[in-house]
Image (tube, rainbow, N blue to C red):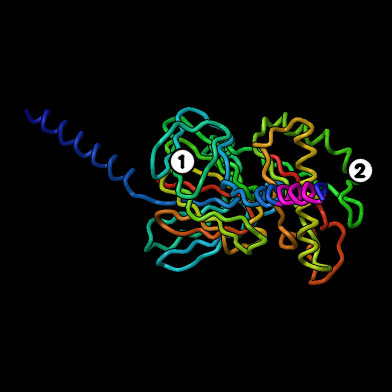
Amino acid sequence: MKIIICIAIFTALFLAGFKQCFAQTESFGIIKSVSGDVFISSTQNTIKAVPNMKIRKGDSIRTGDKSSAGVIFEDDTVVALGPNSEMTIGNLAFKPLDHDLSFIVKLLKGTFSFITGQIAKLAPDKVKLETPDATLGVRGTKLIVEIN
Amino acid sequence: MKTVTRFLSFVLFFSLSLIFSGCAPKTTVVLLPDPSGHVGKISVANKAGTFDITQKDQETVIAGQESKPSKPEILSENEIRKRYSHVLDALPEQPKHFILYFYSESTELTPKSLKMLPQILNSITEKKSENVSVVGHTDTAGDRKYNLQLSRKRALIVSRLLIKKGVPPAFLSTTSHGEENPLIKTGDNVHEPRNRRVEVVIR
C-alpha cells in the first residue's frame, strides 16, 4: 500500500513538473551583440543593453552615435541596428502548434539590416516592418532599411 | 556694411539649404540575397498603393506615406558596401540548427545523433550562447495526440542530456511544434521519418 502511495505521489509530481516545463513563456529574442551605446526601453524603464539580454513585446531598442547592435529572434530572424537607430517590437509570436505566427516591428529611424527566419517561411504574410513612409511585407530574404 | 550683409545672407541661405535638404524624410529599402543566395520579395504598402520589389540588389525610395515608391534601381556591390557596410557587419551569425533522430517510436537516440552531442556542446561554447531551444517535431501520420506527446518527451530527453553535460538549465527552452513546422513538406497523414526529429537551435 505504501509503495502504491509513493508511486502515486511521484507520478503526480513528475507530471506537474512536466507540465511546468512547457508552461514557461519564451521571450521573443535576445540582444546578441552591442557596440557603443545601446539602450532597451520597456514601458517601465530604460536600461543599457548588454549581450544576452532578453527582448519582449513592446520593447524599444535604440542605438547612439557610432553604435550598433545585433539581435536574434526566436524564429532565427537576425537584425542589425546601425548608429542612431530605433526599433520597437510590435507583435511577435512563434507558436506553430497554436497556429500563432507573427513578426511585426516598427522602425522609427536609422539603418537596419534583416535576414528573416522561420515565420517568413511558415507564414509569409505575417512579417511586417513598419516605417514612417510605408509598411514592408517581407517574404524570406535579406534586406536593408534606411530611414532619415 | 554691404559686404557684411552679403556675407550674412549667404550664411543664412546656406544654412537653410542644409536644413531643408536633410529634412526631407524618406525610407530607402534595398533587397539583398540571403546567405544561401536566395532572393525573396518585399511588398511596399502605403496610401499610394502596394508595390513589389523582387530583384537582387534593387533599391527603392519612399518619400512619404502618400508617395509611390521610386522606380527600383539596381545598386552595385560597391555602392551597397560603401553605404551600408557598418550595418551589414553588425548582423549576428544566424542560429545553428542540429537535427537529432530517435529509434522508431522510442525515446532512444540513434548512434549517429548521439555523436552530435559533443558538436552541440562545442557550438554552444564557441558561440558563447546563453540561449538554446530544443524543439520536438512530428510528421503528419498517426494519432496527433500521441505524436505530440512523443515529440515533447523526446525534446525533454535531449534537454536533460544537455543539462547533464553541463549546459545551465536557464539557457534552455523546450517545446514542440507538433506537425506544424516540418523539415519536408508533406500532405496530411503521410509518414515522413525525417520530420520526426528534435532540433537544437543555438543562438
Give the residue at x 89% y 57%. Answer: B105
Out of B53 and B75, give the one closest to the viewer: B53
Q: Residue furthest bottom?
A: B188
Q: Nearer the viewer, mark 1 or mark 2?
A: 2
The reply to whether residue B5 is visible in this rendering is: yes
Q: Which SS does the magenta portion mostly show?
A: helix
The chain identifier of the residue carrying mark 2 reads: B
Q: Which kind of residue does numbered mark 2 sit on?
A: Lys
Q: Are marks 1 and 2 in contact (CB under 8 Å)?
A: no
| Pick the front one: A77 or B17 | A77
A23 relative to B163 in the view: left or right:
left
Q: Position of residue B87 (x, y in %)?
A: 54, 38
Circle 1 chain:
A
Q: Are marks 1 and 2 on the same chain?
A: no
The three-letter amino acid code for the residue at tag 1 is Ile
Count of numbered badges drawn on the protein: 2
A55 is higher (above) or lower (below) than A105: above
Is-magenta flag for residue A97? no
Q: Which residues are magenta?
A: A4-15
Give the left or right position of residue B169, taking residue A68 as reference.
right
Q: Residue at label 1? A: A61
> In the rendering, at what x and y percent does residue A2 appear?
80, 47
Label 2 sits on residue? B112
